Each structure stands twice: as C-alpha cells, then as structure tokens.
Image (cartoon, coloured by chain):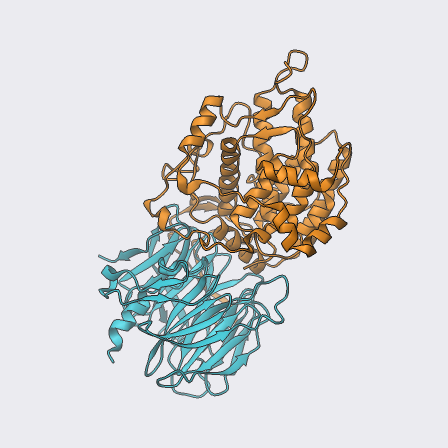
Chain colours: A cyan, B orange
Amino acid sequence: MDIRPILKATRLFISSKQTEGRGLRAGYQGQLQRSVGTACRHHLHRQLAARVRGSDCKQIHWCVLPFRVLLVLTSHRGIQMYESDGSVMVYWHALDAGDASLVQAAFARGIAASGHYVCVGTWSGQVLVFDIPTKGPNIVLSEELARHQTPISDIATEPAQGQDCVADTVTADDSGLLCVWRSGPKFKLLTQIPGFGVPCSSVQLWQGTIAAGYGNGQVRLYEASTGTVHVQIDAHARAICALDLAPEVGKLLSAAEDTFVHIWKLSRSPEDGYIEVEHCHGECVPDTQLCGARFCDPSGSSFAVTGYDVAEILRFSSI
Amino acid sequence: MSMRTLPLLFLNLGGEMLYILDQRLRAQNIPGDKARKDEWTEVDRKRVMNDIISTMFNQKFMDELFKPQELYSKKALRTVYDRLAHASIMRLNQASMDKLYDLMTMAFKYQVLLCPRPKDVLLVTLNHLDAIKGLIQDSPTILHQVDKTFRQLTDIYGGLSAGEFQLIRQTLLIFFQDLHIRVSIFLKDKVQNSSGRFVLPVSGPVPWGTEVPGLIRTFNNKGKEVKRTEFKHGGSYVAAPKEGSLELYGDRVLKLGTNMYSVNRPVETHMSAASKNLASQTQESIVPNPLAKEELNLLARLIGGMEIQKPSGPEPGFRLNLFTTDEEEEQAALTRPEELSYKVINIQATQDQQTNQELVRIMGEFEITDQSRQSSSKGDDWLAMMDEL
C-alpha cells in the first residue's frame, strides 16, 4: 500500500476542535467527504455516511499505523473507526456517560496514533487506548489512562525512538496539565508537567521536544524527558487553537483566535543541546477567528487554515 | 458541550431585547398630557419595561434556568422571547418581532466573539444586568429580583475554570454559527463589514492574563532565563489595564454588553442573503421529531403560563413598531428572505397536555404570583394565548 498519498491527505485533514466537524468543512448532518481535491490532488472517494444519530461529528483524524490507516471520528455518542477509504466502519465505542456529571455533556476529543495503538481522549480526562490489529475489525480497548481530571484537549505522538524510557505520547487537558507517556501494552507515565491555570488547547511532539499552545496565547517548549520548560513564547493575543509540525524540517505552526498564524523553526543548540526557537513568518487572516491549522506537507512549505463562520479551507503556500 | 450556557444566553439576549424596546419606546414617546389614547407615554414605557423585566426575573423561572441543561434549539428560544416580549400590554407584529430577534442575536454574537477572554462573557452579562437595574430604578421589588439573579450568577460562574469558560464560549459560538445579518448601527460603526462578518481588530489591550505578543524567552535546565529575543507579531497590542469586577457594584472595564442604542441612533437591519452557501448550511433537522415540541420545555411553559394582560375595555391595543412606518413594517414582512424566517413553534396545547401528563402535573404545582392580574381559569387563558400565536 502506498502510504505517501495518504500522508499528504492526512496533513491537509484539519481536525478542528472548536466547532463540530468544521475542520473538514464538509461535515454536516453526519456526512463526511474527503475534500479539497485541488489542494492534495485526491479524488473524491466516497461519502461517508457517519451513522451518528442526532449529534454532529466533533473531531476527525486519520491515524497512520504501521500497517494500515484508520479514519477515527469522535462525537457526543462515541468513537467510530473506519477503513481509510471510508468503505466500512470497523469499530464503534460508545462513550460511557454513566457517571457524566450533570454539568458536562459527554464527548471525546483528542485523537492520535502511537505505534499500533490509537489513543482517544474524553471529557472526563480519561484517555482510551485501543489496540489495533494489522487488519480487520478486531480492535480492542486495551487500557484507560486515568491521570487527567479535566477534559482532554489534545494528544500528540511521534514514532518511538528506540530506547525504553523515551517519550512517544503526550496528552493535554483543559487545566493545562501535560502527561508524558511511553506507549506499549501498558502505557508508562514518564513525567507530568503541571498547568498554570490556563487550558492547553494543543500539543505537538518532535524529537523529544513538546510544544504546547495555551489559552492565553502562549507557546511553551518543554524537554519531554524531564518536563523542564525551555522556551516560552508570547505568541498570540488570544487563545491558541492549533499547533502543527512539519517534521522534516522542525517547523512549528501556531494559529490562534487573534486571526494570526505564526511559523517557528525549532532547533537544538549546538553547545548544550537545549531547545531553541526562531520566528520565521507571520500571517494575518483578516477578521477570521481561526479554529484549525495544518501544514499541507511534511516540509512545511504550505499550510491551510479554517475559521469560525468561514465556509472555506484557506491554503497558503510559500513562494 | 457545556451545560451551563443557557442562563448566559438567555440573560444577554434578554438584555439586548430590553435595550431595543426601551429605545423604540422612548423614540415614540409623547408627553403624557399631549398623548392621544393610542400613543405611547413615559408611564406606558416604564410599565412595559417593568412587566417584561419582572417576568424575566421571576424566581421560579430563574431557578429552572440555572439548572445544568443543554441549550434550547433556535426555534424554542425564539418562542421564549416571543412570549417575553408580550408579557405586557405591548404587541409586536411578526415583522417587528423578527427584526427585534435579529438585532438581539447579532448583538450578542458580536459580544461573544469579541470577548477578550472566555470568562469575559460573564462581565458582558453583568453589564446587561447593571443596565437592566437602571431601567427599573423605581421598582424595589423587581430590583431585588435582579439582585438575587446577580448573586446566582456570580455564585455559579465566579468559580468556573478557564477551561470551562472556553467550553461555554464554544457552545455559544456554535449556536450563533453562520448568522450574518447586517445591522445598520454595526455597519456605521465599522464593527461589521458589508459581507456581514464582524471586524476583529488586531490592536488594543490584550485580555487579562495574556502578555503582549512579541517576546521569546529561553531558559536553561535550572529554570534560569538565558536569552530574550523579540519577533514582529503583526498586531499592535497593549497590556490590559485591569481586571473587570464581578462585585455587585464595580467597574466592569469591558464595554461589551453596555447599551449602544440611543434615541438618535435608530436600529435597522438589512436582510442579508449572506453567502450563497447558506442553503446548504447545517439546518435544524428537517425530520419532524415529535418530541421537538417538548424541547420547548418547562421553561417556556413557565413563561407561557404567565398571564398576558389582554387589552380589553378602554385600553387600546398598544402596538410597537420596530420600523419607522407601518408601511415599512409590512414591506419587511413580505420581503424577508426565506432562509431567515424563524419558524416559531405552534403548540397545540390540548394535544400536548394529553401526551405529557407529567409536565402538566408540574405546571399545576406552580403558582404564578403576579400582582393585579385577573384570570378566569389559568388553563383557559393559556390555551387562548397559545391559539393566538
């Protein structure tokens, strides 16, 4: 199976958490379309009739696993997993709203693939870990991580670097707490980074560096192995809605409700190996409160954004 | 989604409604001794304001409102305001009611969108409450009701976390999604552009708790700052002056939610066809859900159960026109774009009573205590009023 075209499409697939299913800009009435043919030169494959009764799709993510790609959807009712072409639903997990406090509606938010696991966050702070076989529908809920006390906002992963204690998964929640894990049959908590009273809306992981975007417009970079903060950027004047990484070049993208997108270059200092950051580019999308943003390719030469009340996906390319 | 959003939605929309009604009533004000029988006077205006505000802040109503619950559908909410606007001797035609609701929703949408922090929506609500108290200075009983609501508000929302406010904000924004009605006063003030989108300024004070963008600080392993660099953010922000107060009396700092209308700034709306995609946008489910009318639940029934003073005897029917002339009002009704029509729910009260014994029983338990209202039978009046819709 050719992974490359799918990776491209994954990059473009903006999962927006602010508005229900908005990131696709095609998700409405429970129908999904793999969209934006011009941007990534994919044909429109098929309309996915997501069988979510009554409620909207909240978030969507293509999970790239070692031998397959799954399309994972969250809604108020539960979590659905489809084959990557949308042909068949392979798994459905109903959210246990049994002990949902009356003050909070149940929902799932935060989707990421780590090795052959798919992690999905929930409103209660629990992170559900699903073990995915190389093919077929025999998906199993393998673990429920119970470290967070507030709704999960985002989950980031990167391919395991080999050694046992190296972090490959980071989970973030609405209190700003970050938990750093090593995936496996039993996920191991490596370290915790406490919040400071501000929600962490988005998190990314790259070569042992955690990038976290916060509700007060700050981006912070942490050393994943120790949890120490190394860089603090007063990046935006409103809450950050999305961070994305171009892993080939170490570029970080931050988008916020202040209408701005900023591109940063991450690196390690040659002397002491500490994380450093440099501002590359800023772009204003006038009068648009951004909801989602993604690089369109692993080299970060173009990116796309979605905004509140905006019907299009806007794509920017470097010239 | 947050289940604590309804009180904020209701109180703020209600506040905007009162601003508009107050402005229109003042604009049509005739000095008492010169007024004919069918013209508005200052006394009438105050009476209407008092009636509507005391209905809005009725204690049982507020208790229901503050229970954690999902937001009403747009139809249900619109019906609640229909009833509220008719809680007094004032009458509004469909066209005027539509315009009123358009203005209310666009104003609050604007306020939510421009709130610097998610928590600032609470300050917006307090601004509305402060202004409402200004409208009923002469009525200590109603003032007391509003103060009670104030305390309920700050008790519940004062302690919510930033994450919970972010969820509330998202819930509100989803409710207002794709609404692009152009409001004349917004267009004049350049806070809305001709496409119907609100202008988001990239200057001014940052939210309380946010730093002015532009600084990159680097730390070593021990937490000591080792480098400081600046970058060009693109906006021109300044630091926040101070935090708005949540006390009963205090400087809210934020201007959003204060009364932007005055006698000299009439309110008009342009029915915008918005974007050509409007038709394909998410509509409320077209499949008729037989339980949808139950969505217009206890809360709306409570308001529905409030008796309306029917104009009878020597009192003429007091109709308020939100347009400049009657002809304009008629014209607006005829030319309102289809996609913007509010489908107000018509309830067949008898049928509902049969299918919902429980609610009827609860309704029976509520005693609506209103001063100087007469009634034959509460049920009959309620049914009669429903049939009028």
Task: Classify residue B216 by image quadrant.
Answer: bottom left
Give the quarter of the image for residue B69: bottom right
Quick check: A292 left or right of A199? Answer: left
Above/below status of A26 relative to A157 = above
The residue at 40%/40% (across/down) is B338
Place of residue B56 in the rendered image (x, y in percent of width and height, measured from the top left): 67, 40
State the residue at coordinates (50%, 69%).
A172
Q: Is residue B40 left or right of residue A50?
A: right
Query: x%, y% of residue B269?
Result: 45, 32
Measured as percent of width and height from the top left, residue A220 is found at 46, 65
User: Is residue B221 in view from this perspective?
Assistant: no
Q: Note whether A5 is above or below B384 in the view shown.
A: below
Image quadrant occupied by the C terminus of chain B: top right
> What quarter of the picture does the N terminus of chain B occupy?
bottom right
Question: Is residue B11 found left or right of A141 in the rendered image?
Answer: right
B122, above or below A23, in the image: above
The residue under the point 32% across, 59% down is: A304
Front-lying residue, A201 or B279: B279
In front here: A100 or A23?
A100
